[in-house]
Amino acid sequence: MAEIRLEQLAHSYHSAPSEPADYALRRMEHVWEQGGAYALLGPSGCGKSTLLNIISGLLTPSEGRVLYDGKSVNDLTPQQRNIAQVFQFPVVYDTMTVFQNLAFPLRNQGHSRERIDLRVREVAEALEIEPLLNRKAQNLTADEKQKVSMGRGLVRDDVAAILFDEPLTVIDPQLKWRLRRKLKEIHQRFNVTMVYVTHDQLEASTFADKIAVMYQGQIVQFGTPRELFENPQHTFVGYFIGSPGMNFLDISLGTSGVEFEGRALAVADTIVTQLRQVKAERLQIGIRPEFVQLVTPENAILHGHVDLIQDQGTFKIVDVCLDTPSARVIKVRIGEEQVVPEGRVGLSFPAAWQRFYVDDRLVEGTHENL
Amino acid sequence: MKTYNNKAWWLVLPVFALVAFSAIIPMMTVVNYSIQDIFDPNTRYFVGTEWYREILADPRLLDSLLRQFVYSLCVLVIEVPLGIIVALSMPRRGLGVPVSLILLSLPLLVPWNVVGTIWQIIGREDIGLYGWILNSIGLDYNYASNPRDAWATVLIMDVWHWTSLVALLCYSGLRSIPDVYYQAARIDRASHWAVFRFIQLPKLKNVLLIAVMLRFMDSFMIYTEPFVLTGGGPGTATTFLSQTLTQMALGQFDLGRAAAFSLIYFLIILLVTWVFYTAMTHNDDKG
């Protein structure tokens, strides 16, 4: 049980890193509080697994420190850190039975027979693998094996934290949902810090209280699923979270205020003033497809025509192709019952949901002023 | 109506011919010899199983069979664990990898009779390094007169020549174990012994199976090295099966007996290999 703090942490697989691209992890400060359920979310190759392996001690960071409860553990092995980790693909000890597999970490620590028996049965029950306990591990199916791998992580109740590296990749969808619930239950029961790496936003938001979104070796935002949805701190978060992701348009500041390809957008004066003060190479407006409104052409500034309608069952995604020179597509998410107008349509961006980005970072305050 | 086209069988013909000429026909020739008594190309008698019965009762042969089994057992008991130890201590990355691979491959490139010659010289007490050292530290070593020394030398020669093969096979097996297994073991706080016992050894099972079978078959058919070193002596101390067979077939031109012997020899190797294979894989499909 521990609070895990990352201090000035960075990691490069190069021996002499010189530019930012050489770093798998760029310098970061981060705290995982004791007892939290966290998700580390990001696309493949963003450094999630590297970060996890650094926390567990399988990898030594090239810069910075990892602190457990304020003490540096940089020089400690995974064994000494007393941490559990579950990997993406199942790792079982083939020649052992399921029971022996689950008991293995406890036996290595020299626990008593009764205690081992008790813990193994408890975890087997939670993961619903009791009937398999006497089976040889090598003959299990992939998802059974993965449950055994997870069980080995959960069986030790004195660990500093349990780290999961995309543990449900090999599990089929129905079982996935049940296992996530199980993990959450186990988390509540044992009050142990859990960090869960995934590239699936749904998985992250059902498991975790707070999600850290990683992009290009950095944690670009750390917050609740709601915060990530409503106020993405980085264009990547806007794009990556949500289905479909946020709409972004490149804007400029003209005489009439905020303009998109020569058309003035309805943006509050306070924001325009604020935007005029920042120096930016790239200025963008972002709005979630859920909040874009389809209106009659007369009442709109931006116009376009409906390009594609995807019916998702409970909602529809409408692709509106703007009639500006770039012919950009804006995605609009509307209710199943709502009728999509034919021909030319107008779009409106409600002021409460407009977000502004300077060089991919959210301009602080632009959403609170409204 | 369905049209059958059997032309594809023609494609199998070359392989069939190859197998026939390389294995089936020679083998049948041996079977043919083993059930006849041949005096000259025109005089032959059918004798049924007589040669087999005679062979199986021949003390010379039974002696050499026993010797052969003991020898192959010693080879396996020494070379397999030693090969595993060598493989485990080989470097996993860096310049050490090619260097150790080349060093280990060298003995495998030396022809059998050259190995025999090398050890014949190296074991001599007057000019051989090994023989001279043993004698000068007070051990009475002489492979030409002492059966125990001759045996030990043939065995050491085999270990020197072939442990590399086991080591290389095991090394390739070890390299194929994904890193994540070692990582999981570290997380589970497994000891070095536990890593070997529960990860490396089970994952090496398939290559070990190949290593054990290859080393068994090869050592069971050993001929050149003892022939060059001692000619099978002193007495019959290092006369192994294939040498007994050669003496019978070529030395005495006893084709019928030699053919029966060959077939029994072949069946023993087949049987023992099958036993090894079954013993090492029988756990695979048990729950």
Image (cartoon, coloured by chain):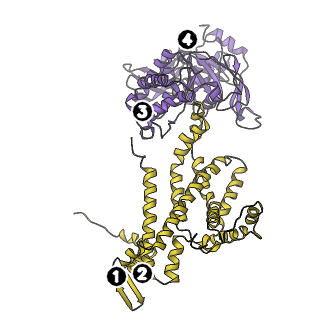
Chain colours: A purple, B yellow
Q: Where A279 sits versus B84, above or below?
A: above
The label nearer to you, 3 versus 1, is: 1
Q: Nearer the viewer, residue A148 or A349?
A: A148
Label 2, on which residue?
B256
- Could you tell me residue B9's position as x and y percent? 36, 69
Instruction: Report the Cα–Cα distance between label 1 and label 4.
Output: 106 Å
- Mark 2 is on which residue type? Gly
Label 1, on which residue?
B47
Label 3, on which residue?
A172
Q: Identify the chain of the residue marked 1, using the numbered disc in the image.
A: B
Decide which of tag 2 and tag 1 comes sooner along the chain: 1
The label nearer to you, 3 versus 4, is: 3
Residues under numbered marks 2 and 1 in contact, where contact means CB atoms less than 8 Å apart: yes
Determine whether the residue tagged by mark 1 lies in a helix, strand or loop.
Answer: loop
User: Are tags 2 and 1 found on a single chain?
Assistant: yes
Instruction: Report the Cα–Cα distance between label 3 and label 1.
Output: 68 Å
- Could you tell me residue A92's position as x and y percent? 50, 36
- Mark 1 is on which residue type? Val
Image quadrant where one finds the C terminus of chain A: top right
Is residue B103 visible from the viewing direction of this image? Answer: yes
Q: Nearer the viewer, residue B95 or A232?
A: B95
Residue at the limit of the structure toward the top, as seen here: A369
